[in-house]
Image: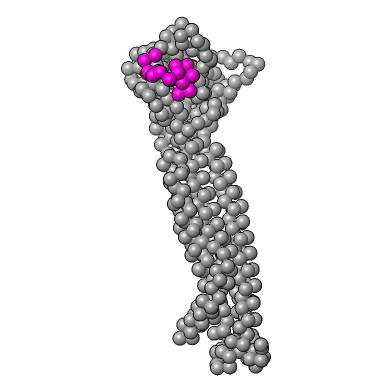
Amino acid sequence: MRFREALTVAIDALRANKLRAVLTSIGVIIGSASIVLVVTVALTSKKYVISQIEAIGSNLVWAELIKTPDKIQPLSYQLTLADMQAVRDTVPGVETVAGFADMPMTVVVEAQARAVKLIGVTEGYQKIRRLIVMRGRYFDSGDMDGRSKVCLITEDLAYRVLGQENSIGRSLRMGELTFTVIGVFRERTATFGLSEMEKYSVIIPQKLMRDYTGQSTLTTLQAQAYGPDAVAGVEREMTRLLKSRHPAEAEYNIQTLTAILSAAHSISFGLTAMLVVVAFIALLISGVGIMNIMLVTVRERTREIGVRKAVGAPRKEIMTQFLIEAFLISGGGAVVGILLGLAIPVAVQQLLPGNLRVPISNWSVIAAFLVSSLTGLFFGWLPANQAAKLDPVESLRYE
């Protein structure tokens, strides 16, 4: 009954000073909304960055020969189709393997020449790299095995060389061969020339590339693991396999996206921690504001406190009353701030690229409410304790 009475008195006191209570809670609203927004933005950006990285090729492991510019390396050092087959047959945890060889080339269309990158790809390349075919089609088994003189070109090359016309079925001359364009593609996520794919690239079946160049070597050997947990094992086994199949002097650079993903995780965590600290600072400032307003309230209501004590209200009840007021200010502000922090991501959902969904962290909501409420109680304890210690006789004399 005493708690209910203290709650009623606290609510009546806040109603009597609505504007003051609202202004005091603004800091809490901002702080709690900031916590929810910071965590939401961090999770969304982390999810987006990781999806962009994995769009290059999920669970990907690739190997390249380390070349010395001033030294010609023997053919026995080069990666081959036999290496690719050995990875497929002997390395556990591998779902798909592929390889490619590339070389600079010049495309001639209607007497116009343009420098391009010619890439000969094996089966499995599309499954690993997941290129998006904008028009036309990708290579089928007949194209791969029959050495058909067909090619796919990048969207930029199609626009630059063939203009606005439909490029499917058009002919491109590269060296002594003429190729028929069967598809126009783009990367699932832009790599800005940091992968084998450049702005002006042409891909053809690797067997055709081998016949054209007279070499069966690969520039890069790619393997896709069954899952993230298998990536490290595949990387280790590929390293062992290549060392066993080539001279000891040959060195290979075997990479995964794990390091890039770890860097993305670290950057995301660092930014999140920094922004959460800023949100906590906002809550601390709001807590100081709550304490200041509560101290003013205690002074203004000194006579009221004296009357309550004179009619038998114990010290604990007085203290509970003022702590309830502090909690209602901070807790109410936290609820409003959390709702605001949840409403903003929902409102901007339609503006986000692709199918990116905004993840809402339940822990951020719980943390925002608890931290905001505890901040109010912590900074409200001093005014509440001061009110509880007031002498009833001196309080009744106070004007």
Where does residue 151 sit, x and y in percent of width and height? 41, 17
Q: Quadrant of the C terminus?
A: bottom right
Q: Quadrant of residue 288?
A: bottom right
Q: In this rendering, is residue 299 above or below 208?
A: below
Residue 170: in sight, yes or no?
yes
Q: In this rendering, is residue 139 above or below 381?
A: above
Where does residue 102 sit, x and y in percent of width and height? 50, 18
Q: What residue lies at 52% left-to-right and 49% top-to-bottom?
A: 41
Q: In this rendering, is residue 131 above or below 309?
A: above
Q: Quadrant of residue 305?
A: bottom right
Q: In this rendering, is residue 122 above or below 266?
A: above
Where does residue 350 sit, x and y in percent of width and height? 43, 45
Q: Nearer the viewer, residue 364 or 61?
A: 364
Where does residue 36 sit, x and y in percent of width and height? 51, 56
Q: What residue lies at 62% left-to-right and 19% top-to-bottom?
A: 68
Q: Residue 56 magenta-drawn?
A: no
Residue 94 located left or right of residue 324:
left
Q: Nearer the viewer, residue 2 or 209?
A: 2
Q: What residue lies at 43% left-to-right and 39% top-to-bottom?
A: 354
Q: Which residues are magenta?
A: 155-170
Residue 82: in sight, yes or no?
no
